[in-house]
Image: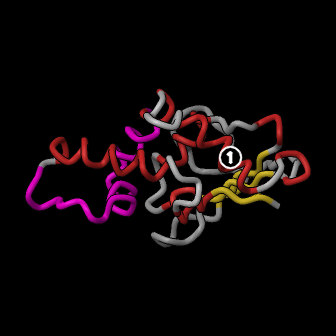
Amino acid sequence: IDQQFNLLFPQVQGNYEFDMYTGDQTNTGLWFIECKSTDELPADMGQLSAYFSVIRNISNLEYIFNTKKAGTETQAKQAVQKQLYNGTALINMGTNLFNTIWGNTALRGSLFPNLDYTNKTIDELKPEAILLFKAMVGNTSNSFYNFIKTK
């Protein structure tokens, strides 16, 4: 999986190059595949945030880490987790990623489907969503991390 991809992709937030784009025809289908090597662990959070700014569902994204370089899937998930959460609180990158998700209406709705959007404003729901996000990123077994794969 370590190679340079030279294909044209839609412009996504920032000056990031993306490995594979399969399209955004469906809400739950795979749109982006990003291949990572050990020197990219932990992950580039700016690039991850760029992906999260456009996807509608966590299933639209796959980060594939090379097991020969990055280790197991658990290790890859833990490396990303360490950039988001220190065991008790979100760190800056975790807060930034949450804010990106919160700004993406479709992704926000798919990651926080149980929030009562009818009786509260988005600003009133944000503290509850932050607590839910902390719980998500605090557990690498949470479905939030399903976008991380190793091959």
Relative horizontal placement of residue 139, taking residue 1 as reference (left or right): left
The quadrant of the rendering that contains the C terminus is: bottom right
For label 1, the SS is loop
- Residue 12 colored magenta? no
User: Between residues 16 and 146, which one lies in front from this camera angle?
Assistant: 146
Give the vertical position of 138 relative to 88 (above or below): below
User: Between residues 85 and 101, which one lies in front from this camera angle?
Assistant: 85
- Residue in view at x 57 percent, y 50 percent: 10
Which range is magenta?
A: 96-120
- Residue 98 colored magenta? yes
Q: How many marks?
A: 1
Query: How is the structure coloured here?
Result: secondary structure
Main SS, magenta residues: helix
Q: Quadrant of residue 110?
A: bottom left
Relative horizontal placement of residue 57, taking residue 48 as reference (left or right): left
Amino acid residing under circle 1:
Phe
- Residue in view at x 88 percent, y 48 percent: 3
- Residue in view at x 46 percent, y 46 percent: 53
Local crowd size for mark 1, using a 10 Å CA cut-off: few (<14), some (14–19), many (≥20): many
User: Between residues 149 and 141, which one lies in front from this camera angle?
Assistant: 141
